Amino acid sequence: MNIDLTNCDKEPIHIPGKIQSHGFLIVIDGGCIIQYHSENISDYLDDMPAELLGRHVNSIEPLIGKNEPPDFINQLIVFGRANGFEQTNPFNTDIQGKLFHLIISASADKYLLEFEPARSDSRTDVHKMIGRSISEMLADKSLQNLLNNSAAQVKSIIGYDRVMIYRFAEDGHGEVIAEARNPDLQSWLGLHYPASDIPKQARELYKHNLTRLIANVNTEATGILTSADNDVPLDMTNSQLRAVSPIHIQYLKNMGVDSSFSISLLYKKELWGLIACHNYSPRFIDYRSRESAKLIGQILSSALEFRQDEENQQLQERYKSAVDQLSRLMLKDNNIEYALTGHNVTLLNTVDATGAVLIFENSVTKLGITPTDTQISGLVHWLKNNVAETFYYTSKLPSEFAEAALYRDVASGIMVSMLSRELGEYVIWFKPELRQTITWAGNPEKPVEVTPDGISHISPRHSFEAWSQTVSGTSKKWTDEEVKSAVRLRSEITYAINQKAGAIRLLNEKLKQAYEELDTFSFTISHDLKNPISTIKSFTQILLRDVDMKPQTVKILERINKGTDKMNNMINEVLDYSRIGRSELVLSEVDPAQMINDTVRDLLLIYNLDEGSINIGSTPKIQGDPVMLSQVFSNIISNAVKYSTMARPQRVSIAGIENEEEVLYTISDNGLGIDIKQLPRIFELFHRTDNVGDIEGTGVGLAIVKRIVEKHRGKIWVDSEPGKGSTFTIAFKKQALY
């Protein structure tokens, strides 16, 4: 029998059809007509009409707030739609002499009206404690002390028996990294919990709802009623009262927990972890107190982000300094191998590795702790036959290359930068095995139970006794900063090789042969392909003149017409690419201002953009071929505009700066961005990134740009982040190229 171990990930927890019973719910549409309500509404409101569904909410307003002005709910909705419901929440009201909070949120085209008691079970005044608590949280610069302080302060504010800071790993499992608890409770510090304990869709909801209260696991959830002809489940993503998954309720009961409260911790809008609070008796926290607790989470998230960014920036500066020094050494020293390995700063300084090897010009140079020569030879053979990418990295090499298990103590992790597949030239960095024992809170495998009707399903874990697992064959992960540094170093090495290639590289003869083949290929394209394409386009246009043609036929012919234009453009771009290598440079001093302004003016018209969306800064003069340089700026600026059209607001900036040796131009946008795994291939012919969707392009433009820049003895590179945009930097030599 096949059992789906991912059923926790598929549970539709955002549409439970129930709420927790410590409050009640009314759902209205845009016309304030009641479309849903909780079954327990009569427990809170006297003299209820027999049938609420379909009534205007004004008809029961007097039962909700006797002292409220007429139509007050509709006024709150109108105000919230214009200004955000966080400005109205919570609205204080009085129901049968008891203070209640009305919390309003949107659900598609409807509005959730949630009513909760306005007093917590605890007598602690959260609002008075919050300022002092935040000060004490941030009192220490140590990250671990910050986490410890935060756990202690949250515990003192809300009074729960146990408060943990729980961090998610890349695979979704979590670890308790800080805690504050009652003295009689056993410590859970350092325990790991499998990803299935907080499944994927729950982690997504934690990004929308920054606090989540389960007041009492022992109470029955209350159902939500709607009309018989309404089969649309109510989306309760933004709900405060949303009922809890039965699997999670049983999970908490198995732990002996009666009430839980969580505060989300975010890093760059992704879920970093949780402040998870457990109480061993029921505990209700009112909305205002939850919002105050949420503030702690937001401040802790900001502090974590600041400290992580600060650490990343320090690493980036360290790696950048090492790459810059190696670049200068390579251009100064005729021996590239010695420049990379023979000085105080070497390949090892560009990433956080314990060993590295440079395989270059039939020589192998090792640095630090590496596998043996025989093992390196076997590894390179495996790379040639199994890794197609020009850039590759893994932290689990033995699981991908079985022979690597023999030297996992020095190379469980590798990062490979291919300089030349044909010549077998590589830079390889090594990270040692990070052998560790992970202590799980119980066996991480969820038990399978069979119901009386014979159906197998996954049940909540019952045992939380410490269960140890030893992880081997894995290294510390390669960080984004290390990947960026290695990609940039490869670009610098390639540049240095190209500058010194001359007669010493074996590529000359093969390059000559490749040019001859490219000439033949270019002629074939221009003659054998463009003629039939022109014929197809001409016949298509003739057929389109037939007014009696069926609409579907017209549509097909228009698609053929559009396709021929696209193919013709690609042919022209490939021809341009093939000619660059043999084209003679017409050198002069070029003022890019005019070509940039012309390109921007055209793009503003084509994409109907505001002038303020493209900012042009300083435009220092450069040495080069005006026609070719016009292609460079036109292509990069067009891409920046094209791939940022969905950004709101759209921002593209173009600026140049100069130093003693170079003029550097940067073109930045806030568009789609490029995944770090795609960066090494971004300038390859016909390569397009996975996230461009239906945006038109051939994958030739950036390859053309790179060839032109290199023909000018310049350099081009890109720094990018998905969803944040890209920055292309072009460096032109200041001295004449004659």
Image (tube, rainbow, N blue to C red):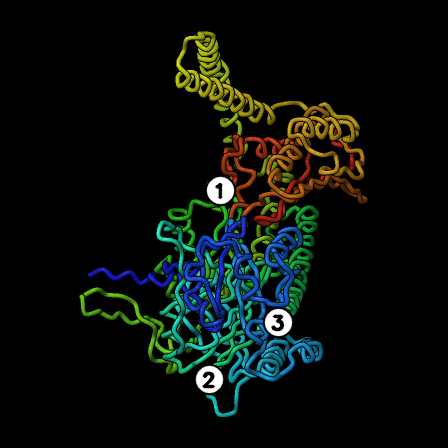
- Relative to 429, does residue 515 appear above or below in the rendering? above
Q: From the viewer's side, name the closer residue of 272 and 107.
A: 107
The kind of residue on which mark 2 rests is Ser
- Residue 486 horizontal/vertical position (percent): 58, 53
Q: Are marks 1 and 2 in contact (CB under 8 Å)?
A: no
What residue is disc 3 on?
A: 288
Q: From the viewer's side, name the closer residue of 675 and 648.
A: 648
Residue 71 placement, left or right of 662: left
Q: Looking at the image, is mark 3 or mark 2 earlier in the sequence?
A: 2
Give neighbour class at mark 1: few <14, some 14-19, many 20+ (Cα, 10 Å): few
Mark-to-mark CA distance, 3 and 2: 21 Å
- Residue 656 horizontal/vertical position (percent): 77, 40
Mark-to-mark CA distance, 1 and 2: 50 Å
Residue 281 numbered tag: 2
Badge 1 element: loop
- Residue 126 horizontal/vertical position (percent): 64, 78
Q: Looking at the image, is mark 1 or mark 2 earlier in the sequence?
A: 2
Q: Are marks 1 and 3 in contact (CB under 8 Å)?
A: no
Mark-to-mark CA distance, 1 and 3: 44 Å
Quadrant housing residue 70: bottom right
- Residue 494 horizontal/vertical position (percent): 59, 43
Give neighbour class at mark 3: few <14, some 14-19, many 20+ (Cα, 10 Å): some
Q: From the viewer's side, name the closer residue of 34 and 362.
A: 34
User: What quarter of the picture does the C terminus occupy?
Assistant: top right
The kind of residue on which mark 3 rests is Arg
**Disc 1 vs disc 2: which is toward the camera?**
2
- Relative to 625, does residue 692 appear above or below in the rendering? below
- For image coordinates 42% across by 75% down, the residue present is 438
Residue 388 placement, left or right of 131: left
Q: Looking at the image, is mark 1 or mark 3 earlier in the sequence?
A: 3
**Disc 1 vs disc 3: which is toward the camera?**
3
Residue 690 numbered tag: 1
